[in-house]
Amino acid sequence: MSLKLMYITNDPIVATIAEQSGVDRIWIDLERMGKEERQHEMNSVKSNHILKDVAKIRPYVKNSELMVRVNPLHGNSQAEIDEVINSGADLVMLPMFKVTSDVSRYVDMVGGRAKVMLLAETAEAIENIEDIVRVPGIDEIHIGLNDLHLAYNLNFMFELVANGTVDKICEIIRYAGIPYGFGGVAKLGEGLLSAEYVLAEHYRLGSSMVILSRSFCDTCMIKEVEQIRSVFSTGIKSIRNYETLLKNQDSSYFINNHKKVQEIVYSIVNEIERKRQ
């Protein structure tokens, strides 16, 4: 089965193009609480999406799924989750959870009205992951490399793939029978760690999903509709063609790919550390 591709946008035109090009999930990102403080030094996406965007986008998402990331659990979480679901969300994602009781509360708040997606991105969540996966009602788990690598005081998000951390997390989630994914991917041939290497790691680890990163199609930089359409059409076709190649590889291919990933990642990390000296 091909990876489910997810793309963040609150623009109806971009959502339509993404869906028509083969994106499986359109993602509204409502998370604001604490994100700026955590990622203030990172060139990461700080969303300006609002609750009304869910209802605005819903009519344009016809064949794909509409996924919404809400804020971490807070005093008004139930009202936020209710509005997101009533506005048409198919999946509701919880970020920054830490303990099993957080997940149980969240599952109860969703109440079976939408799929429950967890974003495992805190050191505490990973510490408690064996208990967390036993909570009934979890549909999927995504491993958030951005915040998780910060939690571990690492320099580069893909260190978590190179050092075996993601392998261990995936093994626990897979044993629980829950679909999972991790991180994001750029266009083929792009990214500090090229997308080809990242996609092969998804196949090695049995991943079900991946985020199309901002660099895949940065609509802050690309404004022309036909250019956006071309980027999505060619970019997703390239990913699907590469997946076809990966499906026909044996285990030695993925072992060698992982070794190359380790080599590249630690070279990047060394360069980051050198520049900081």
Image (spheres, helix red, strand yellow):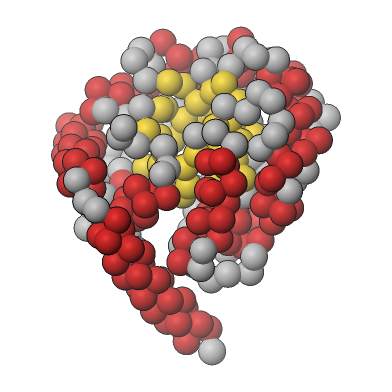
In the image, residue 218 sits, relative to residue 92, either above or below, namely below
In the image, residue 251 sits, relative to residue 179, either above or below, namely below
Can residue 65 be seen by looking at this rendering? yes
In the image, residue 165 sits, relative to residue 126, either above or below, namely below
Out of 270 and 207, give the one closest to the viewer. Answer: 207
* Residue 84 horizontal side relative to residue 229, left or right: right
Q: Position of residue 53 (x, y in %)?
A: 52, 22
Res. 25 image quadrant: top left
Res. 165 image quadrant: bottom right
Determine the residue positioned at 46% across, 66% down.
162
Quadrant, the C terminus? bottom right
Q: Position of residue 152 (x, y in %)?
A: 64, 65
* Residue 219 horizontal side relative to residue 30, left or right: left
Q: Position of residue 243 (x, y in %)?
A: 23, 43
Out of 147 and 163, give the one closest to the viewer. Answer: 163
Quadrant, the N terminus? top left
